[in-house]
Image: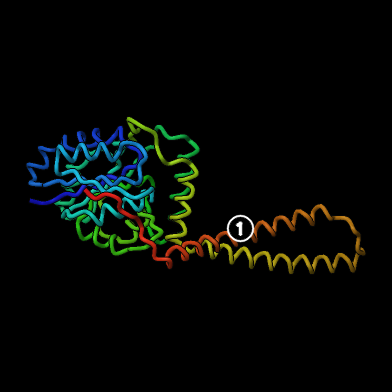
Amino acid sequence: MKLLSVIVPCYNEEENIRDFYDELFRNDSFFRDKEIEVEVIYVDDGSKDRTVAEVKKLHEEDERVHLLSFSRNFGKEAAIYAGLQKSRGDMVVMMDVDLQDPPSLLPEMYNYIEQGYDSVATRRVTRKGEPPVRSFFARMFYKIMNRISKTEIVDGARDYRLMTRQVVDAILAMTEYNRFTKGIFGWVGYETKWLEYENIERKKGETKWSFWKLFVYSLEGITAFSTVPLTVAAVLGALFCVLALCLIVVIIAKTLIFGDPTSGWPSLVCIILLVSGIQLFCLGIVGQYLSKTYMEVKKRPIYLIKEDI
């Protein structure tokens, strides 16, 4: 018998806990035919509703259900890492509890693993149901990321991915505090098969990812897998130095030829504001990398467990 570990990060998802369980085990006949044992690891990321209570109910009914509950909210990246550490399976799959990752794809994903792929990943080919502004910025993020980073991140990629134990161990070897899982998947490599599907809207509850949270998450990805922003800051500094030297020559020549009129202070103020803004922007870029270094060297744990059932 092979063991499949299903990792399910949760944050205030009491409405979806049982629905996900029911939908997952609609594939029970497939699991039996393929002689696959299943363990479901719900990772509660410090929920404030009845998420933990719902998982405990399922555990009483089915010992295949496990619970990891954090002492507070550490974020989805920490929940994924904790689930991977807890998993014992020969194969591991990560899925969202809101059923936007359809469990019905599991048989097809497993067939590709049998064919020799190391992992089977999924991507959405549409963003139906998302606000247009959010979809636009998401696509722009993937374009920018793939231009400035050597690590390939597929547009529309989901965390829904079936992996062999070898891939899981490679991911766990990356113990960095500032985690960006989509980039880590690409960095470790291995032969990956991509499956495409139409976007599925969550049936219950509301998304926990606001536009601001996604923006901050995108900055995490850029600073984790690219140093190009630091190069951009250096290039901007060099360009402004050259521009300043050229303007000094122009001003000296103009003064010698036409005299030294006192007009032009509004444009001077605008230039000062522009240059100051560029300086602060570059300083902010350096600060982002410095803050990530600061968090890494403190060696704090990625998460803390309150309950392990």
Q: Please rate how many residues cluster around mark 1, counting C-alpha atoms within 10 Å: few if below 14, some from 14 to 19, many from 20.
A: few
Q: Residue at x 91, y 63 (%)?
A: 260
In the picture shown, does residue 177 fall above or below 306? Answer: below
- Depth check: give the residue in front, 246 or 224: 224
Left or right of residue 149, residue 27 in this image = left
* Quarter-of-image position of residue 156: top left
Q: Residue at x 40, y 61 (%)?
A: 150
Furthest residue in direction top, as rendered: 203
Q: Residue at x 88, y 66 (%)?
A: 255
* Residue 17 percent across, percent down from the top left: 26, 36
- Residue at numbered disc 1: 281
* Residue 209 percent across, percent down from the top left: 42, 41
* Residue 118 percent across, percent down from the top left: 21, 56
- Depth check: give the residue in front, 86 or 48: 48
Left or right of residue 287, residue 189 in this image = left
Left or right of residue 92, residue 294 in this image = right
According to the image, what is the colour scheme of the structure? rainbow
* Quarter-of-image position of residue 167: bottom left
Q: Helix or strand or loop: what does disc 1 sit on?
A: helix
Identify residue type, mark 1: Phe
